[in-house]
């Protein structure tokens, strides 16, 4: 059974196109996260699903119903906003009851559902308070409780944690994960620019860029097998090291030559026509390790050492004019500025992208 | 009197109720015409969408009607009437405009209006700025501001009575009970009939408007001054600027926009000045301004709608640049949303 | 002296000057109103004989009085004595000086024994009691004429108010002003709030155009509307057989003239409400009508209050619209109109004008002081944002 289906969804404001045709199927009960840099259209897409933005082209189905022209309240959705969007002049109870009162539910039913939601979210002691008397975390819980009360088929979150401080963000993230477990049949769509939220919460992540889907898949698949340069750089922190290179040998395995002349062999298949073409060679900072022997990928002087305690980041002096290579060492790593070090990585951790940014598949 | 009070209250309640009833009923009607049932979501959605197509016009209807009848239609009608004779029945072409061009009274009014425009906005803004700066630095500044702002609540007619008493003149050897003449006498001068001194009497009338409007300028400018980021002033202090330089080179440039708004707001008010001239001199002793001249022509000898329409159009032409500027500004803002 | 100099040094001369100059400005701004207020409670005779700034000190006037007749004289020893009081019953005053010739009414100080010659003496005390004695019997039929420099104490009275409220029709005008101002304030609030909501949060073709129109209409001079509306009112009046000048007519006129600014102010405020709150209500299933009534209206109270104060002050203080759309009869004339008429007919009667003026300004001034916060907020919303 399908939850939400997007068929060639497009959005334009006058001449300016912001969504260029999105195809996506979301199963019922799935937790899908839209992630991407700001301006990629992820919030617009969510708001189109909610019915807060009109759909310029394509078809949107919720629960097998075409809902392009259906107003938000009839779509069976609930939405949690970034700024909580609580009604400031109503108590917590009234905030949660508002939608049901509009729908003319009976008083007892309203009371039952408000109290049930308040219990789940530990809001029972605050039901008579006004939003201004609550902390940020409590406000966000009220916003979630208001959504729960609507008993939606699809739960929409628009960057719900970005107004919270770091500690609260982690706590509320865990609460959302728990909430998902308690509502296995409810589809959830969650928009964020924070990849940690995306990686920890999602069943599937949808990476968006400039109004297009870059890749859809489970979190670890995106991390391990990015389909293109954009996803490779977007997922993971610090971002993957990308070095321009040239293909110097094709076949079941491929050899590329880095700008400093070093040849690197990858377990990636290429074909003869690709011989001599430019390619991007990638390796994640956390996959690099310091080696002593002659078998290494990069050699260079340490330009900056960032000791964070749990990890140590080493920035090598850049070779040529591309960005410096970053290596992420676990724990405290004894290195000083000016030390010459050699770095290497396992062959299956190496990535290669063609001139258009697509990944060469193994 | 009591019965009038009761009927007034009754009408107020009924009027407000009727108003509310209109909005409530029209919305109910909308729900009846476009019903929404849960059985078919597509039909329900279509009807809901139709409701949102109609609803803006229900909300806007009464406002648009009032604006149309009381402002838009009259602007057009006034324009047309300016080409007709005193009764509004016969077309006379540009005769009314020609009259205005050669009429001494009209020219006198234009001259006086220009005089008002040159003096009042400038003085109000300047005093307002100075008082705002002074009062912002003392602990009882808010009380002072409130008292200086107070004349804003007084009607022009009330203010005119208040100031007429200041300018009061007693002939012969009678004691001068007008403050101004008493002061003049105290310093050895001769008491004057101030409001009957041609040319200078304009300024005595302007004082009234300045007295009323300075508080307005002060309040707005004081808020703008407080909106100046403290850091820019601190940076100037570190750079070695003195108080005078900080005021003119750091603070004033940052509130130019607000100064312009205050200036134009008072300018519009000055253009339409009517009550003060009516109650103080009724245009005698060369104090006539356009609004009073127009009012005169509206009723003089049964009224001359053509000539007064021309005078009204002069006022309209004077505010048009401000109007265009405002609209541009508003458009920029709405596009920004 | 020394401590004062110390004080100045501690506060600093510039600070002192600052305080003094602000104080001076405040006094300058208050003096005109104070003049009217004080004059309105002074006795009418005192108003014309002395400036209001002397109201709290006594004024000295020369009076004539006649002492008791010789027939009232009593013999005390060898002297004949007439005693009594120069003031009639109920009159108060203080005798400063007295004299017996009109040319010199200040010849003797009060309480001093004046030697009038021929054994005749006279003492007039401050309270008016006198002792007039002579070593022999008094001549003539009538009492001696004396001249007094009398200090009359300040007289304050509410008579002026009683007079204007009843006989000058100011009381009726006050009721008329209320009848005009209150509906003229309330009616446009609701209408403009609905319009402002539509222009803020509803999608429809021509919205930007309407906003521009409203902004443009804010500055249209009232004068542009007067002639066509006067004609329109007369036509409607004769068509329906109702008087063309009525309260309903002026309510609608005031409502319409206030509408552009009202819509502009309220739209600025309502459009500034958080978008997500409106959207959240929409997701919750509220129609625009419900959103307006249950969310926007309660949240817009400060803006509504600001506009209400503006509109009330404007309608209460208006003269022009009332002169055009209301009659001048006693049951229609408003305070400003009545005051203007009094200025014409009672030019020199300051006790009437001052009391009437004070009644005219008291309501808006009270509203001003009570709700100043909202007024300032409204002004700022209307002006600063426009810049």
Image (cartoon, coloured by chain):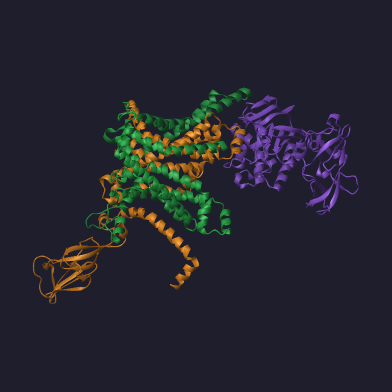
Q: Quadrant of the N terminus of chain B?
A: top left
Q: Quadrant of residue A221?
A: top right
Q: Looking at the picture, how far across and down is residue B81, in whole percent?
A: 35, 29
Vertical placement of residue B142 versus C8, above or below: above
The residue at 54%/37% (across/down) is B332
Quarter that holds the C terminus of chain B: top right
Say whether residue A132 is left or right of residue B188: right
- Is B21 on the left-hand or right-hand side of C349? right
Residue A123: percent from left, percent from top: 66, 43
Q: Nearer the viewer, residue C102 or A143?
A: C102
* Left or right: A148, with C270 as reference point: right
Q: Nearer the viewer, residue C62 or A359?
A: A359
- Whether residue C351 is visible here, answered yes or no, is yes
Q: Residue at x 32, y 39 (%)?
A: B106
Whether residue C168 is visible to the viewer of this picture, yes or no, is: no
Q: Position of residue A49 (x, y in %)?
A: 66, 31
Q: Colour of chain C?
A: orange
Q: Colour of chain A?
A: purple
> Chain B in the picture: what colour?
green
Location of residue C173 with respect to A362 vertically, above or below: below
Residue at image coords 39%, 46%: B118
Q: Position of residue B330 (x, y in %)?
A: 51, 38
């Amino acid at each position: 059974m399908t939850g939400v289906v997007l068929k060639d969804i497009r959005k334009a404001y006058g001449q300016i196109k912001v969504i260029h045709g999105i195809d996506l199927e979301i199963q019922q009960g799935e937790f899908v996260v839209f992630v991407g840099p700001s301006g990629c259209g992820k919030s617009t897409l969510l708001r189109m699903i909610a019915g807060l933005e009109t759909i310029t082209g394509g078809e949107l189905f919720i629960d097998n119903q075409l809902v392009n022209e259906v107003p938000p309240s009839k779509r069976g959705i609930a939405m949690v906003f970034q700024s909580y969007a609580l009604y400031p002049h109503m108590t917590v109870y009234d905030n949660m009851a508002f939608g049901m009162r509009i729908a003319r539910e009976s008083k007892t039913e309203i009371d039952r559902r408000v109290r049930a939601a308040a219990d789940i979210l530990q809001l029972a002691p605050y039901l008579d308070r006004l939003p201004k008397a609550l902390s940020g975390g409590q406000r966000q819980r009220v916003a979630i409780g208001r959504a729960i009360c609507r008993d939606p088929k699809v739960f929409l979150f628009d960057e719900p944690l970005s107004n919270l401080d770091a500690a609260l963000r982690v706590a509320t993230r865990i609460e959302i994960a728990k909430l998902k477990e308690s509502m296995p049949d409810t589809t959830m769509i969650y928009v964020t620019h924070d990849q940690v939220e995306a990686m920890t919460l999602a069943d599937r992540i949808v990476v968006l860029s400039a109004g297009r889907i870059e890749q859809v898949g489970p979190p670890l698949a995106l991390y391990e097998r990015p389909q293109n340069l954009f996803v490779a750089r977007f997922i993971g922190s610090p971002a993957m090291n990308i070095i321009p290179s040239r293909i110097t040998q094709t076949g079941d395995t491929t050899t590329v030559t880095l700008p400093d002349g070093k040849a690197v062999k990858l377990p990636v298949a290429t074909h003869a026509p690709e011989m001599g073409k430019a390619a991007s060679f990638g390796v994640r900072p956390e996959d690099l390790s310091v080696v002593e022997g002659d078998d290494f990928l990069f050699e260079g002087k340490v330009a900056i050492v960032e000791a964070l305690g749990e990890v140590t980041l080493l920035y090598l002096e850049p070779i040529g004019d591309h960005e410096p290579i970053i290596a992420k060492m676990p724990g405290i790593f004894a290195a000083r500025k000016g030390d010459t070090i050699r770095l290497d990585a396992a062959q299956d951790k190496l990535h290669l992208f063609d001139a258009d940014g697509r990944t060469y598949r193994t | 009197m009591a019965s009038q009070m009761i009927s007034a209250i009754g009408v107020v309640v009924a009027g407000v109720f009727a108003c509310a009833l209109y909005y409530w009923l029209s919305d109910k009607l909308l729900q009846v015409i476009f019903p929404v049932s849960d059985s078919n979501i597509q039909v329900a959605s279509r009807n809901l969408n139709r409701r949102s197509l109609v609803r803006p016009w229900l909300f806007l209807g009464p406002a648009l009607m009032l604006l149309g009848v009381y402002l838009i239609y009259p602007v057009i009608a006034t324009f047309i009437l300016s080409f007709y004779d005193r009764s509004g029945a016969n077309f006379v072409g540009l005769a009314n405009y020609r009259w205005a061009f050669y009429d001494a009274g009209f020219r006198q009014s234009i001259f006086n209006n220009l005089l008002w425009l040159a003096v009042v906005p400038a003085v109000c803004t300047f005093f307002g700025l100075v008082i705002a700066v002074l009062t912002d630095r003392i602990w009882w500044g808010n009380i002072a501001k409130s008292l200086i702002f107070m004349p804003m609540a007084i009607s022009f007619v009330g203010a005119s009575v208040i100031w007429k008493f200041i300018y009061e003149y007693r002939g012969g050897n009678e004691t001068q009970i007008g403050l101004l003449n008493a002061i003049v006498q105290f310093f050895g001068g001769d008491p004057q009939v101030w409001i009957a001194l041609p040319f200078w009497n304009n300024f005595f009338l302007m004082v009234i408007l300045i007295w009323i409007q300075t508080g307005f300028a002060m309040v707005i400018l004081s808020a703008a001054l407080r909106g100046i980021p403290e850091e820019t002033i601190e940076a100037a202090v570190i750079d070695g600027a003195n108080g005078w330089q900080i005021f003119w080179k750091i603070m004033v440039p940052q509130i130019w926009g607000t100064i312009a708004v205050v200036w134009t707001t008072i300018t519009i008010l000055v253009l339409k000045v009517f009550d003060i001239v009516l109650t103080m001199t009724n245009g005698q002793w060369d104090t006539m301004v356009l609004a009073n001249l127009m009012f005169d022509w509206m009723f003089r000898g049964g009224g001359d709608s053509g000539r007064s329409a021309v005078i009204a159009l002069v006022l309209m032409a004077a505010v048009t640049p401000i109007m265009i500027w405002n609209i541009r500004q508003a458009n920029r803002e709405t596009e920004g949303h | 002296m020394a401590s004062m100099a110390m004080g100045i040094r501690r506060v600093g001369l510039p600070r002192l000057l600052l305080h003094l100059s602000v104080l001076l400005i405040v006094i300058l701004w208050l003096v005109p109103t104070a003049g009217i207020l004080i004059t309105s409670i002074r006795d009418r005779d005192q108003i014309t004989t002395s400036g209001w700034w002397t109201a709290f000190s006594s004024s000295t006037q020369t009076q004539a009085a006649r002492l008791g007749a010789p027939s009232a004289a009593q013999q005390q020893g060898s002297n004949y004595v007439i005693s009594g009081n120069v003031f009639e019953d109920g009159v108060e005053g203080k005798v400063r000086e007295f004299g017996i010739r009109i040319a010199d009414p200040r010849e003797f100080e009060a309480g001093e024994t004046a030697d009038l010659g021929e054994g005749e003496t006279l003492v007039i005390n401050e309270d008016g009691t006198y002792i007039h004695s002579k070593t022999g019997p008094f001549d003539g039929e009538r009492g001696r004429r004396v001249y007094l420099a009398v200090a009359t104490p300040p007289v304050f009275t509410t008579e002026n108010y009683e007079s204007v409220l009843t006989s000058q029709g100011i009381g009726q005008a006050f009721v008329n002003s209320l009848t005009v101002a209150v509906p003229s304030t309330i009616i446009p609030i609701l209408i403009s709030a609905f319009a402002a909501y539509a222009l803020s949060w509803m999608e429809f073709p021509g919205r930007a155009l309407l906003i521009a129109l409203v902004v443009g209409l804010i500055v249209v001079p009232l004068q542009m509307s007067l002639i066509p509306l006067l004609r329109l009112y007369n036509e409607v009046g004769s068509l329906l057989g109702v008087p063309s000048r009525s309260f309903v007519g002026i309510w609608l006129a005031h409502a319409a003239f206030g509408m552009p600014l009202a819509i502009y102010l309220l739209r600025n405020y309502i459009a500034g409400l958080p978008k997500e709150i409106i959207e959240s209500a929409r997701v919750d299933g509220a129609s625009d009508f419900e959103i307006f009534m249950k969310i926007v209206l309660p949240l817009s109270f400060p803006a509504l209050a600001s506009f209400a104060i503006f509109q009330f002050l404007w309608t209460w203080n208006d003269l022009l619209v009332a002169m055009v759309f209301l009659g001048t009869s006693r049951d229609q004339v408003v305070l400003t109109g009545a005051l203007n008429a009094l200025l014409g007919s009672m030019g020199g009667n300051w006790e009437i004008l001052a009391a009437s003026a004070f009644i005219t300004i008291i309501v808006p001034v009270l509203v001003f002081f009570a709700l100043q916060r909202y007024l300032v907020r409204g002004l700022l919303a209307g002006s600063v944002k426009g810049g």
